[in-house]
Image (spheres, rainbow, N blue to C red):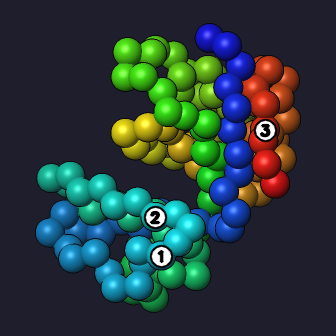
Amino acid sequence: MSPLRFSVVAGSYAVLRLAPDAEVPPGVLVPPFHSVTRTPAELSVVCPDEAVPEEAKAERGWAILALEGPFPFELTGILASILVPLAKAGVGIFALSTFDTDYVLVKGDRLHDALAALAAAGHVQVGG
């Protein structure tokens, strides 16, 4: 796999866990980034830290790495090329994919370690 280009999305983010039949809380779907995933077991929402409702179960303090896509669906190894260096550096992740690209969340206090591991693996940070 060739080196990938990625950027850091501005801000600090939270991952919320809600009941599978819960409504999306008002006020969480705000720019610059949010994501909603419903499964039979839960409703997960990623939103800016400041948008988390008081009563929500949330894991705060995530930074978002946006891989520069779009990536064809038949291309393999995209996430592995990012996740393996992060795993070797001991950096935990929360991954999200969209139609065009992938996003990898790392805890904000490990962002420097994540960036160093990705640079050492040959990946290139762009922007900010």
Q: Which residue is mark 1?
A: 30
Q: CA distance from mark 3 to mark 2?
A: 21 Å
Q: Secondary structure at mark 2?
A: loop
Label 1 amino acid? Answer: Val
Q: Position of residue 10 (x, y in %)?
A: 70, 63
* Mark 3 secondary-structure assignment: strand
Q: Earlier in the sequence, mark 3 or mark 1?
A: 1
Q: Which mark is residue 34?
A: 2
Residue at the (48%, 76%) spot, across then down:
30
Question: Mark 2: which amino acid?
Answer: His
Q: Residue furthest top?
A: 1
Q: Is residue 110 left or right of residue 79?
A: right
**Looking at the rendering, in which quadrant would you find the C terminus?**
bottom right
- Marks 3 and 2, the one that precedes in the sequence: 2
Q: Position of residue 82 (x, y in %)?
A: 63, 27
Residues at discs 2 and 1 in contact (Cβ within 8 Å)? yes
Tell me if residue 118 can be seen: yes
On screen, 9 above or below 96?
Answer: below
Disc marking residue 125: 3
| Mark 1: secondary structure | loop
Could you tell whether 113 is left or right of 7 in the image? right
